[in-house]
Image (cartoon, rainbow, N blue to C red):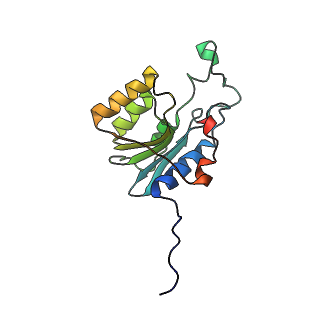
Amino acid sequence: MGMKKRGNYISWDEYFMGIALLSGKRSKDPNTQVGACIVKDNKIIGMGYNGLPKGCDDDEYPWDKEGDFLNTKYPYIVHAELNAILNSIHSNLKDSIIYVALFPCNECAKAIIQSGIKKVVYLSDKYKDSDVFKASRKLFNSAGVILEQLDIKDEIIISIDKDKI
């Protein structure tokens, strides 16, 4: 018998999370770059990152995290998960999986549930004690959405700057 296949290839979860992390690199946000990747039957059907809606100039809006609400990024940014849903090439996301760098907020949780996504695979849950993320978890649990925190071992994938997600 000849050569055997190599054994150190990445898993599907690592692959799709790597795509989500790479998508986050498109974000113009100086503080937080989050990417998301929606997958069905091991095929990518949607991707997104946190940014302004189409047609809105990145240079005309604030990127601040603090201050008067209208002078911060929060009223203007579309989160990675919602962008991935809106950018999906499928109209039916039922039973798909979303890979996202950061555990989804309550607004994204509602969109994920409404779109029919069955599983959320995430890396960071650094805001888990915040009410917004407690609400997300409650919504996901009520709707039966599976939640899985991924522990990536591959050095190439984890070398992407985790401080920015």
Q: Quadrant of residue 53?
A: top right
> Where residue 90 sits in the image (x, y, percent)?
41, 50
| Residue under the image location 50 percent in, 78 percent down | 4
Q: Is residue 98 left or right of residue 49?
A: left
As displayed, is residue 93 above or below residue 110? Answer: below
Q: Position of residue 55 (x, y in %)?
A: 61, 34
Of all residues shown, which one is farthest toward the top? Answer: 68
Residue 79 versus residue 73 in the image, above or below: below
**Number of marks:** 0
Q: Is residue 100 above or below residue 72?
A: below
**111 vs 66, nearest the viewer:** 66
Tell which of 91 and 153 is nearer to you.
Answer: 153
Residue at 33 percent of width and 29 percent of height: 139
Residue 119 quadrant:
top left
Looking at this view, name the residue that lies furthest to the right.
59
Q: Position of residue 77 (x, y in %)?
A: 57, 29
Q: Looking at this view, is 11 or 95 the one in front?
A: 11
Q: What residue is drawn where x is 43% and y is 28%?
A: 107
Image coordinates for residue 84, horizontal then vertical, percent:
49, 42
Q: Quadrant of the C terminus?
A: top right
Classify residue 28 as left or right of residue 154. Answer: right
99 horizontally vs 140: left or right: right
